[in-house]
Image: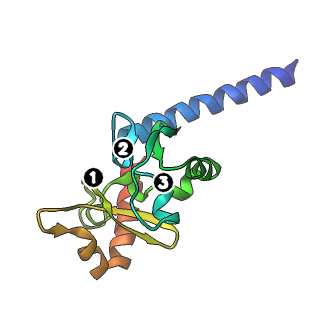
């Protein structure tokens, strides 16, 4: 009986922690009504090396954030290892996160994969921040990692 009560308390604790994680992610990730990357498929950046619109037919919610996928295969790939395919810094502009620590919206078509991680960038009004990122990538990446840790507590 003690074992069952212990097991129930562990399960309840995990559920509460998961709900808290989802609430934090929802507060800090770049999404519109829960939909990340404007509906672009996060796996396609890695497999097709291109930004591809996903479909609501192939949707999955991970930690309170919903992603659309272009194919059922991409959906299954994501489900197997979601954190490997989520964009860095909650989907906010990597350059802005490294330069000022601000959450700036992105253009899903402006991206870079570095060391197996997806980085998204702002690109409007002749301001392609990927170009600026490339000039000082190592330092901006370190700064962005530190800034995101401060935001995502």
The reply to whether discs 3 and 2 touch (Cβ–Cβ < 8 Å) is: no
Where's residue 66, x and y in %? 45, 39
Q: Is residue 111 above or below residue 34?
A: below
Where's residue 20, x and y in %? 50, 33
Residue 55, quarter of the rendered image: top left
**Which residue appears farthest toward the left when viewing the image?**
125
Q: Residue at x 43, y 57 (%)?
A: 87
Query: Which mark's residue is nearer the viewer, 1 or 3?
Result: 3
Residue marked by disc 2: 28
Give the mark, 1 or 3, whose residue is nearer the N terminus: 3
The reply to whether discs 1 and 2 touch (Cβ–Cβ < 8 Å) is: yes
Query: Which mark's residue is nearer the viewer, 3 or 2?
Result: 3
**Which residue appears farthest toward the bottom when viewing the image?**
135
Q: Residue at x 45, y 52 (%)?
A: 41
Residue 138, quarter of the rendered image: bottom left
Q: CA distance from mark 1 to mark 3?
A: 16 Å
Q: CA distance from mark 1 to mark 2?
A: 9 Å
Q: Identify the disc placed on residue 86.
A: 3
Residue marked by disc 1: 103
């Amino acid at each position: 009986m003690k074992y069952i009560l212990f097991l129930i308390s562990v399960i309840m604790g995990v559920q509460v922690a998961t709900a808290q994680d989802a609430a934090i992610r929802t507060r800090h990730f770049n999404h519109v009504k829960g939909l990340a990357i404007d509906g672009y498929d996060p796996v396609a950046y890695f497999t097709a090396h291109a930004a591809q619109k996903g479909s609501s037919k192939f949707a999955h919610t991970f930690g309170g954030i919903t992603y659309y996928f272009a194919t059922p295969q991409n959906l299954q790939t994501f489900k197997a290892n979601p954190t490997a395919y989520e964009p860095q810094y909650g989907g906010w502009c990597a350059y802005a996160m490294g330069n000022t620590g601000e959450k700036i919206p992105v253009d899903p078509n402006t991206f870079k994969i570095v060391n197996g991680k997806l980085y998204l960038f702002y690109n409007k009004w002749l301001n392609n921040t990927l170009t600026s990122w490339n000039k000082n990538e190592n330092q901006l990446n370190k700064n962005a990692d530190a800034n995101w840790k401060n935001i995502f507590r």
